[in-house]
Image (cartoon, helix red, strand yellow):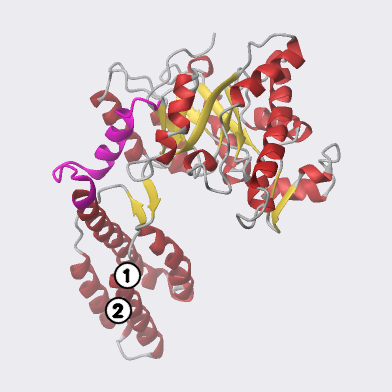
Amino acid sequence: MPVEKLTRIGIGMYRMCLGNKFNEDALLKALSREIDGSDINVIDTSTNYCDGDSERLIGKVLSNSDRKFLSRSEIFLATKYGYIQGNNMNLYQNGAFKKVPDEHIVHYNPNCFHCIHPEFMKDQLNRSLHRMQAEYVDILFIHNPEYFLMNKIKSSNENVKEYQKQMLDRISQSFEAMEEAIDKGQIRSYGISSNSFSVPEEDKHFLPFYDLIDRAKEASKRVRGTEKHGFSAVQMPGNLLERCGLNTTAIWAKNNGLKVFINRPLNAFNEDGAFRLASYPKTNYEHVKTSTFEKLGQNFGGVGPSSQSILDLIKQIDNLLPKIKNVFEWENYRISVYSSLGQFRENPDVNSILQPFLDTFDSEVRYRGSQAVRKYLIEKYNIDENESIEKVALEFLFNSGVVDVVLMGMTREGYVEFAKEMLRRFKN
């Protein structure tokens, strides 16, 4: 029997991988049975998340027969296809997708191709089912079909309408193949997950959604002679700051009986910048920084070239702090910072001093960023200054009237606890 009632928060598996104990524990905690109704029964992944290891983690967890956790039949499982990256790129280069006409493969950049052709869909679905040790998925999403537009349309002077029609014709072909997959019992429904559902209609990469229902009906008629189709949901970014898709695509979807899945609920981008919609606690950064300088000086003489090099790097990192505007900028810096400290961190004694500093620096960046975000939201949206930012952000989506499931990244158990708290708080 299909899962009738979906939880308002689902597990977004974007950064959750097999082999990561934190991720596995978080997924198990999310799927644990709760007497207060805060268990989570929606899992959303994709073939390209962690290069397939996201799906493999799901397979490992779902093979667990412990009744403390939801069983496969109680879980609404979603995956997506479309990307040719990583292992898929290796398969492509080794001729694994010979049945796919080359003109249907979008060569977006050297490391990222894209395809939604029926033969590619069949290949990817079989691989997904194998990785997840599943007989079927509840919904298969076409993942970002707008890559066709992004590759073809470089300026608004081009024939946007014609390229949009070509993309929609490709989607129609995929709909037919997915209707066949429904008949085979491999999927129970299908949908489209697209960033282009959340951009204005005048955007050159906008995905016209108006006749998608009619195209699904036509696909079903061609496959089984009836207009009763399996197109059941759309997925798109949406949050407190990015409301375009909520006010257009989502309303259309709900009016046409489709479910709406929202991703990226806490990572927002607009004309004013990038915002992490989450609260972080105050740190003891200055104390830890001073302590780090003292420990380095005491333990390594404070005068040797190696010790001086470490101290200079720590000072450079400290000087970055007022320049980093948000956690997204820090994530870009982090790679070079850790790389510059690499040779020193190989020494366990040195690393035992450096790591607490780096961890606290990371927390301080997040704290300062959240303070700036709170100030921005109070000024622009008059949010309750005493409420956590993430609660305000999720409450906004819950109360929008057009969102069925909010997909949250839950890489650690703490994020799961927050999700369950929100489910208890907004039970109805």
Counting from the top left corner in percent of width and height, residue 215 is at 66, 23
Disc 2 crowd, CA 10 A, few/some/many (<14, 14-19, 20+) = some
Q: Check disc 1 and give the amino acid type.
A: Ile
Closer to the camera in the image, 314 or 396 = 396
Whether the residues at callouts 1 and 2 have beta carbons within 8 Å, the answer is yes
Checking the image for residue 353, the label placed there is 1
Position of 258 relative to 328 (above/below):
above
Q: What residue is drawn where x is 37% and y is 79%? A: 313
Task: Write down the residue under mark 2.
Answer: 296
Counting from the top left corner in percent of width and height, residue 53 is at 59, 41
Disc 1 crowd, CA 10 A, few/some/many (<14, 14-19, 20+) = some
Magenta span: 379-403
Q: Check disc 2 and give the amino acid type.
A: Leu
Q: Does residue 387 show up magenta in the picture?
A: yes
Position of 113 relative to 248 (above/below):
below
Q: What residue is drawn where x is 52% and y is 14%? A: 73
